[in-house]
Image (spheres, helix red, strand yellow):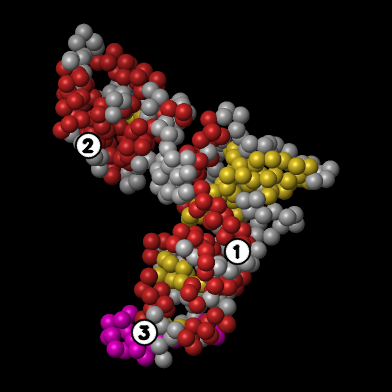
Amino acid sequence: MGKEGQNMENLEVNYMLKLTEQQTKLAEQLLKSIINREPVVEYNELATRIRPPIFWRQVGHEIGEISKLCYKLRLPLLSAKVISRGKGTAGEGFFDLMKELGIDTEGKSEKELFSQELKKIRECSEWYKLAEYLGLDLIFPNTEMSALPEKDHNVINEKNYMISFYKEELKNVNTEYFILDTHKSSVYEDIDFKYYYWEVTRYNQLKEGTLFIYRRPQSSSEIKNQFYFFGTGKIEKIEQINTSLVRGTISKPILFDDPILQEDLQEFEFTYKKRGNSWEHFFNQYGMNKINKTDFINLISSDGHQETIEEIEEKITLFQNQQMQNYRVEDQKSNIKVRGAAQSTFARKVKLIYGYECAITGIHTKDFLTASHIIPWAKDKENRINPANGICLSVLVDRAFDKGYITLSDKYEIILSKKLKEDVLLFKLLKGYEGQKIKYNRSCSPDLIFIKWHRDNIFKK
């Protein structure tokens, strides 16, 4: 075995490399530069691409660690893509690293070594290995998806479950990609994730086999002045309804666990079309926007969630039931998985209605928000996913509401229980909210019948 091979084995046995968060961010940007077919990136440019940005002199060490991991994964040295301004080649540390790793450099100039490594980077079709190792949701145009390891067909890939779900469509060069606007009510008979109608006299580009992302525009959004993306699917079949109207039947639907809000997209860069300083006029008025594969993939890239096909179908059914104001969830169906899907459906809608903000404290950090049932799940199966039976609350006040230490009047004013005085610190924390009116969306305010039930049955008098 040669020196290079021995060094590789030593790395694999003795050096289980784990990148820091900063190094992972830099690796992600370098992988994106491959996707975007950027030949090279300057040190100072790469330093400013991550958040928070770093001093450019820090980059050299960090990309060296990334290249060590690449070597371990039998990939080209990614740091070759990073060059010094005005020099046009990799920094000195790159060539020192090659020697450290035992790579044969004899008889070759630095320029030749640099060009050789860049060529390897361009021709490599296995960059997904680095992305998967780091848990990054990226897909590469020169990566053959058939080369990816097969997974259990009943369970969607934990790291890129939506990409795996649409694996065959993404491999098909004829697949087209769209953003489709949908409204809470429609002049047609649209049922989200089942049917989509449009007039061919106004727009006639949608084809069978198209993959799409649903967008709720500002005019129909529960959140004031914000659109959001909430799911995806495939146009399986297109039928002519009359001379101008057609209907698309939707297959392979997926409902996002958390909608992608307009505010989440401030740094998102579409590649099919450049956006100015605002979203005004970015999406066309008719609500059917053709995008490219890169934008589709970047929008649907998941956060590592894992679901079975059965769970996906259950979530879609509950979502459609909620749209049709059928809020009942039967006891016999309330196993752990179904109850989880129902709770997710309930929470998603309630948080949207409240604009991802606590109705009492105003806290808007998503990790601290929960959708609190007014009448508990176990007490009323008719209203288990009814958004009018819910309030978006932050953790402390949710617990206080759930256990009856606070309730609401018929004017939506906060009432404190006398029991709170038994805990001086807790009373001090909640005292400032007494008599305060909660913030709520008038289009779906908490039902006063449910509020009264809470006062009579949960509140500690």
Residue on which disc 3 sits: 431
Judge from the rendering whether residue 78 lies leftward or rightward of residue 302; answer left or right.
left
Extent of the magenta region: 410-429
Residue on which disc 2 sits: 17
- Residue occupying the point 62% across, 51% down: 193
Q: Amino acid at mark 1?
A: Gln
In the image, farthest residue toward the right: 243
Mark sitting earlier along the chain (2/1) = 2
* 241 within the magenta span: no
Q: Is residue 193 above or below residue 115?
A: below
Using the numbered discs, state the Cα–Cα distance from disc 1 to disc 3 in whole angstroms: 36 Å
Q: Nearer the viewer, mark 2 or mark 1?
A: 1
Q: Which mark is residue 26?
A: none
Using the numbered discs, state the Cα–Cα distance from disc 2 to disc 1 in whole angstroms: 47 Å
Using the numbered discs, state the Cα–Cα distance from disc 3 to disc 2 in whole angstroms: 51 Å
Residue 461, horizontal then vertical, whole percent: 41, 91
- Quarter of the view holding residue 188: bottom right
- In this orientation, does residue 139 appear? yes
* 425 within the magenta span: yes
Residue 214, horizontal then vertical, whole percent: 59, 49
Q: Which mark is residue 322?
A: 1
* Nearest the eye: 260 or 172: 172
- Residue occupying the point 18% across, 15% down: 2
Q: Nearer the viewer, mark 1 or mark 3?
A: 1
* Nearest the eye: 315 or 242: 315
